[in-house]
Image (spheres, helix red, strand yellow):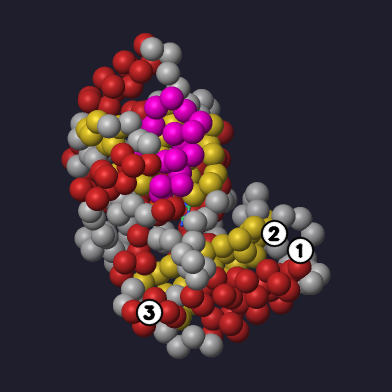
């Protein structure tokens, strides 16, 4: 497996592979890799001849009061995990390699970003779309792999890929969870022992909602109430949002009669965690 810090090195490697007629899968990450990321890399390795992973804590997708400086980093461990999972090239750029100081171009997806994390983290998806579109132009993959854990991100990326005619297949991959149900996340590293226990309330609350849906509940408000009530039983949990939206348009629904996304964001102490399911 190769590692690269510059765009030039990535382009040269990709050019070589293209000359040999090889297909390329791409997995963008912010590092501090776990089994969720590994599932994406392994899938990419199955479906493509070569796999590129990027590890970049992208400053443009963090708000002024978010955790950019404290975001966990572990380049050595990430390199090992990438190799073990079947990556052929890991790209670790510095911010100065990715961004010009006078950068003037933005990539902004409207509509899909007005609710959920888009409403709570202004500018976040503009940062995501900018960096992902840059990576797409650098790596020029055939396929790119994203987790359903970040369901809104996946929808937004599919939309700009369609709107801007990127010739890249976007592959969504299922959420990987800890044995007790907590969705794997690099941010779980922030949780104290006590908070780690409290964090279970996210998947438990979603499970209660799933159960009500399977019994025939069709009112989105009732589903939201079930989740809000369940979250309120956990003293360390503070709800950021609980939404029931159409799974394609991400617009709010009242009566559930088409595929929905049930998505939540919850603070456990100072750590903001997200989880979701589709139904
Ligand atoms: P991140 O490093 O958090 O930006 O995530 C990089 C990619 O891994 C994104 O496409 C995430 O959706 C995906 N990912 C993160 N956690 C999980 C998980 N628990 N299961 C599946 N995919 C995940």
Q: Where in the figure is residue 151, as x and y percent of width and height?
A: 54, 53
Circle number at residue 195: 3
Quarter-of-image position of residue 85: top left
Q: Is mark 1 within 8 Å of ligand 1?
A: no
Residue at the spot 64% in from the left edge and 58% down from the top edge:
278
Residues at badges 3 and 1 in contact (C-beta under 8 Å)?
A: no
Residue 96 as seen in the image, left or right of residue 161: left
| Magenta segment | 37-54
Mark 3 or mark 2: whose residue is earlier in sequence? 3
Q: Residue at x 23, y 55 (%)?
A: 73
- At mark 1, the secondary structure is loop
Point out which mark residue 152 bears.
none
For label 2, the crowd category at 10 Å Cα-Cα, with few meaning under 14, some 14 to 19 and many 20 or more, is few
Residue tagged 1: 256
Q: On screen, 108 above or below 14? A: below
| Residues at marks 1 and 2 touching, judged by CB atoms closer than 8 Å | yes
Marks 1, 2: nearer the viewer: 2
């Amino acid at each position: 497996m190769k590692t690269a810090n510059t765009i030039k090195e990535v382009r040269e490697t990709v050019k070589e592979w293209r000359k040999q007629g090889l297909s390329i899968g791409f997995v963008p990450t912010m590092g501090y890799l776990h089994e969720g990321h590994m599932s994406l890399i392994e899938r990419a390795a199955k479906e493509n001849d070569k796999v590129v992973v990027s590890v970049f804590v992208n400053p443009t997708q963090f708000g002024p009061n978010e955790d950019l400086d404290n975001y966990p980093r572990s380049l050595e461990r990430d390199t090992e995990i990438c190799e073990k999972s079947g990556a052929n090239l890991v790209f670790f750029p510095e911010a100065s390699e990715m961004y010009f100081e006078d950068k003037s171009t933005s990539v902004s997806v409207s509509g899909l970003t007005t609710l959920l994390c888009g409403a709570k983290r202004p500018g976040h998806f503009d940062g995501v779309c900018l960096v992902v579109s840059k990576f797409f132009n650098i790596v020029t993959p055939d396929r790119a792999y994203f987790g359903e854990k970040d369901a809104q991100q996946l929808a937004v990326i599919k939309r700009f890929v369609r709107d801007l005619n990127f010739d890249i297949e976007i592959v969504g991959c299922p959420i990987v969870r800890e044995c007790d149900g907590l969705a794997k996340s690099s941010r779980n590293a922030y949780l104290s022992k006590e908070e780690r226990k409290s964090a279970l309330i996210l998947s438990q609350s979603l499970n209660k909602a799933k159960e009500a849906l399977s019994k025939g509940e069709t009112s989105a408000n009732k589903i939201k109430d079930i989740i809000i009530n369940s979250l309120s039983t956990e003293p360390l949990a503070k709800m950021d949002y609980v939404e029931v939206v159409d799974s394609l348009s991400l617009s709010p629904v009242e009566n559930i009669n088409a595929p929905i996304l049930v998505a939540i964001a919850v603070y456990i102490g100072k750590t903001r965690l997200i989880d979701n399911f589709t139904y």
